[in-house]
Amino acid sequence: MGSSSPILVGVDAGATKCVAIAVTPDGERIGRADGPGANPKRHGRSAAADRIADLVREATRSRTASLVFVAGAGIDRPEQARALEAALVGRLPEIRILVVNDTLAVLRAGTPDAVGLAVPVSTGGNVIGRGSDGRVTDRGHGIFGGGYVLGALAARAARRGRGDEDLRRAIEAADLRWTGRRPGPDAAQLAGAVVAAATRGDRLPARMVDRWCGRVTRAVREEVDGLGLGSEPVVIVYGGLLDTCPWLGERIREAVLAGSPGARLGTLDVEPAEGAARLARDAWNGAPIAWEFTPRR
């Protein structure tokens, strides 16, 4: 690599961890940096921007990048992307900054053209896609499932004496912090206990999982039709709960196929940060993925 070669950085800014990968336009790896989560909704925009900027400098070995492409958790609307871009410009001056939702990095990591749907089975639950014409879904389907939702609903139910004994003990041991009726982010750690209770036959967590799966089915059907993905769309099902809760992963896959029977289910062979680095290269070569739409309310 010549000393004048541009440096591009892809950042996967998740809720629990953040990874930055620096590359050249032809894909040569320059550096990598790992750090804590950088979700603006969870950590605040200023703290998230600080963490991302620090990792960019570490990944580039304090050299100046030409372009930074951030695929971020909590970026559900175009205005949220623009706000984080503005915060990063102040910390990484004279660098082109692009921000999109983190699921687009997953699509780029799992497909050659970033066309299809991404369905996380992790802290959050959502369905986001991209069509062959470049359109992205114009309405995120909200965090309608995921580890946090399962844990939070179970914790609230336990306060009313509902749920089986093993699940209630797990919730008590978690010693959650509460803000009004909403437990803190640590509630996501209860997801495994909630799924285990569902598999034991506890009707309350079983209904939680059923609701998540029903919404996945409806969202997949809607996005396949809305984005014109055809009868055999690629759907990447991914996330930390797949490994820890195989039963839940199978239920989500069944829900996807209920929404699109011909879907080609895929998994990730590389980490999402690699997808973010590929998106950075795409943008440098004149083919950026946009996160621009008018959300449906």
Image (cartoon, rainbow, N blue to C red):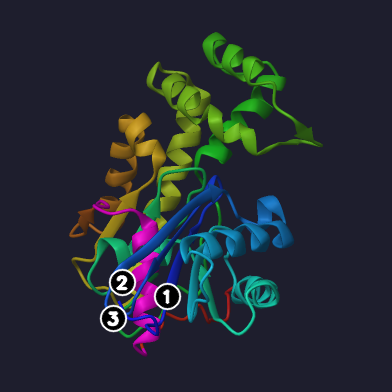
Cα–Cα gap, marks 3 and 2: 8 Å
**Most foreground residue, 158 or 186:** 186
Q: Which mark is residue 139?
A: none
| Quadrant in the picture for residue 88 | bottom right
258 left or right of 136 in image: left
Q: Which residue is mark 3?
A: 132
Q: Quadrant of the N terminus?
A: bottom left
Count of picture labels: 3
User: Which element type, helix, strand or loop, lies under badge 2?
Assistant: loop
Q: Amino acid at mark 3?
A: Ser
Q: Position of residue 219 (x, y in %)?
A: 42, 59
Mark 3 or mark 2, whichever is nearer to me: 2
* Image quadrant in which you'd find residue 226: bottom left
- Classify 268 as above or below 140: above
The answer to whether one can see residue 45 in this image is yes
Answer whether residue 144 is visible to the viewer in this image.
no
Q: Which residue is mark 1?
A: 8
User: Of callouts 3 and 2, which one flags the residue occurring earlier in the amino acid sequence?
Assistant: 2
For discs 2 and 1, the disc positioned in front in the rendered view: 1
Determine whether 66 is above or below 257 in the image. below
**What residue sits 32% from the left and 47% below the top?**
255
Q: Amino acid at mark 1?
A: Leu
**Residue at image location 28% in from the left, 81% down from the top:** 132
Q: Please state the horizontal and vertical placement of residue 249, each as a whole percent of the image.
A: 32, 38
Question: Disc 1 on helix, strand or loop?
Answer: strand
Q: Main secondary structure of the magenta part?
A: helix
Q: Is the C-beta separation of discs 2 and 1 under 8 Å?
A: no
Residue segment shown in magenta: 267-286
Residue found at the very far bottom of the displayed protein: 286
Q: Nearer the viewer, mark 3 or mark 1?
A: 1
Q: Residues within 10 Å of mark 2 (few under 14, many from 20)?
A: many
Identify which amino acid the numbered label 2 is placed on: Ala
